[in-house]
Image (tube, rainbow, N blue to C red):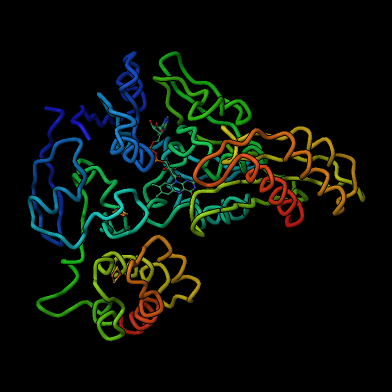
């Protein structure tokens, strides 16, 4: 059936399969089939970054990403960053600098930071703002987030 | 969203055969960043989407040559943003890409989708109107080139027919003395869609402007060249008076659409301001 797909992809380092209908986004599949809620829908329009995940190493908005496009890809969500109970240095930096209040935007901020540091290991403040300008924080912890990203660049 | 048929052909020919179904519910999908929001809002309910993502080769890559830039339709906006070829040949594009949406959208959005969508708020169309460009289109009857000046027909309407695919975009080589600028004015958040996009291009001959191009988008129902402004610039000295007169001509020529970003009268004034600024900043 072309309206439904069996998808094979790598999720946080593990090969997995899932069945998705063509109109479902990857976010729906991650939440329903894998119980992963780190990427969460907020605006649903590509604007806020709460739904950020990495597909083949680049950040995308999961709310606009058709699940079928994940077939054959490598997916990383915030849940896949820690290693054996040890948090990823970017996570440590956000904790150390309190780069959050409610935490709703934090998975997206952390994954965008990962993409930023991949391209610019020693980012300027301008580069930090450029990469994070599409991630919104309703608690407005922006100064602490930028501080966290600076710290993350030291730790990574 | 409602269920639909999703097909992922491996060649351009197969894609065209699948697109050419005489059904308005059949469309191509590249990055999906324009289409999926429309589907979520139920403005578009496809019966079949033809994904281009498994087509390689001809639809990818950014090449520079004597004739200018050749960009595959599936090149992402992120690839264009970071391309040194684009930066060398058309720095005005590289600059605009930095404020075009956000990193996540640019990571998936393609140049082909950007142009085929026909949304007047897109940032690159007015720039391409001033740089000069051609779009290569493939359909059941073969291939044809569409000049960028003939591509945008109206609100979400382009000259790309149902059943046709954009395969490549060719940006003209720029004379070394061409001055360019794109002024993006956002009325809501800083990196919102443009309320007005103003692109300019001119060359001087001696102390006069030899040739000039001015394009306006976002405020209008499609990106448009402004002949009245170009006429004022051509042959005149590149002075504050000339730029002001050209900006006045642009404001008089446009037919702005009112929306959440402003009334028609407001946008007309913003066209005046931002065409003038673009001319002053062109380098
Ligand atoms: C949150 C958000 C903010 C944005 N802000 C901006 C902004 O500030 N400035 C701006 O310019 N743009 C902005 N955009 C729009 C963005 O540039 C477009 O969504 C993107 O360029 C479309 O490319 P795509 O590959 O995702 O297209 P798709 O969504 O895949 O397709 C769009 C249309 O083009 C057709 N199509 C796709 N590829 C081809 C092809 N090769 N041949 C023929 N038809 C084709 C599809 O059938 C569809 O009709 C924004 C988008 C989002 C979601
Ligand atoms: S929920 Fe996807 S960007 Fe806001
Ligand atoms: S910490 Fe609450 S939204 Fe950012």
Which quadrant does ligand 3 occupy?
bottom left
How many labels were placed on the picture? 0
Q: Quadrant of residue B202?
A: top right
Task: Please provide percent x and percent y for residue A44.
Answer: 29, 49
Identify whether A13 is placed above or below B152. Answer: below
Going 42% across and 36% down the picture, which residue do you hit?
B59
Closer to the camera, A140 or B217? A140
Identify whether A141 is placed above or below B123. Answer: below
Q: Is residue B144 left or right of residue A1?
A: right
Residue with the most extreme right position:
B207
Q: Quadrant of residue B23?
A: top left
Going 21% across and 50% down the picture, which residue do you hit?
A73
> Quick one: quadrant of the C terminus of chain B?
bottom right
Q: Is residue B94 left or right of residue B21?
A: right
Identify whether B145 is placed above or below A81. Answer: above
Q: Is residue B192 left or right of residue B233?
A: left
Q: Is residue B39 left or right of residue B91?
A: left
Task: Please provide percent x and percent y for residue B63.
Answer: 53, 44
Task: Please provide percent x and percent y for residue A105.
Answer: 28, 66
Going 42% across and 56% down the picture, which residue do you hit?
B102
Task: Please provide percent x and percent y for residue A43.
Answer: 31, 53
> Quick one: quadrant of the N terminus of chain B?
top left
Going 7% across and 50% down the picture, which residue do you hit?
A33
Closer to the camera, A95 or B54? A95
């Amino acid at each position: 059936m072309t309206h439904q797909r069996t998808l094979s992809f790598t999720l946080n380092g593990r090969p997995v399969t899932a069945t998705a209908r063509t109109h479902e986004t990857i976010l729906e599949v991650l939440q329903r089939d894998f119980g992963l809620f780190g990427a969460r829908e907020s605006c649903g329009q590509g604007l806020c970054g709460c739904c950020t995940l990495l597909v083949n190493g680049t950040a995308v908005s999961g709310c606009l990403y058709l699940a079928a496009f994940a077939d054959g890809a490598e997916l990383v969500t915030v849940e896949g960053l820690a290693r054996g109970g040890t948090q990823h240095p970017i996570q440590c930096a956000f904790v150390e600098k309190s780069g959050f209040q409610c935490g709703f935007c934090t998975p997206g901020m952390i994954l965008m930071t990962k993409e930023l540091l991949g391209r610019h290991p020693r980012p300027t403040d301008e580069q930090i703002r450029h990469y994070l300008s599409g991630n919104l924080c309703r608690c407005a912890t922006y100064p602490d987030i930028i501080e966290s990203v600076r710290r993350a660049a030291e730790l990574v | 969203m409602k269920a639909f048929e999703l097909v992922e052909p491996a060649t351009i020919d197969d894609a065209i055969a699948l697109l050419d179904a005489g059904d308005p519910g059949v469309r191509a999908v590249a990055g999906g960043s324009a289409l999926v929001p429309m589907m979520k809002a139920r403005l578009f309910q496809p019966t079949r989407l033809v994904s281009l993502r498994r087509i390689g080769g001809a639809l990818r890559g950014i090449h520079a040559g004597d004739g200018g830039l050749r960009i595959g339709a599936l090149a992402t906006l992120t690839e264009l943003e970071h391309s040194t070829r684009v930066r060398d040949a058309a720095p005005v594009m590289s600059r605009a890409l930095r404020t075009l949406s956000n990193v996540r959208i640019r990571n998936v959005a393609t140049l082909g989708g950007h142009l085929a969508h026909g949304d007047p708020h897109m940032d690159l169309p007015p720039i391409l109107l001033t740089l000069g460009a051609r779009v290569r289109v493939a359909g059941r009857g073969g291939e044809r080139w569409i000049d960028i000046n003939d591509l945008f027909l109206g609100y979400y309407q382009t000259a790309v027919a149902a059943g046709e695919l954009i395969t490549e975009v060719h940006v003209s080589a720029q004379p070394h003395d061409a001055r360019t600028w794109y002024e993006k004015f956002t009325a809501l958040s800083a990196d919102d869609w443009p309320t007005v996009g103003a692109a300019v291009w001119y060359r001087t001959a001696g102390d006069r402007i030899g040739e000039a191009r001015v394009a306006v988008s976002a405020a209008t129902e499609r990106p448009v060249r402004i002949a009245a402004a170009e006429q004022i610039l051509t042959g005149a000295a590149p002075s504050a008076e000339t730029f002001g007169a050209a900006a006045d001509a642009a404001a008089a020529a446009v037919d702005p659409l009112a929306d959440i970003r402003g009334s028609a009268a407001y946008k007309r004034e913003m066209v005046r301001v931002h065409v003038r600024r673009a001319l002053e900043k062109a380098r």
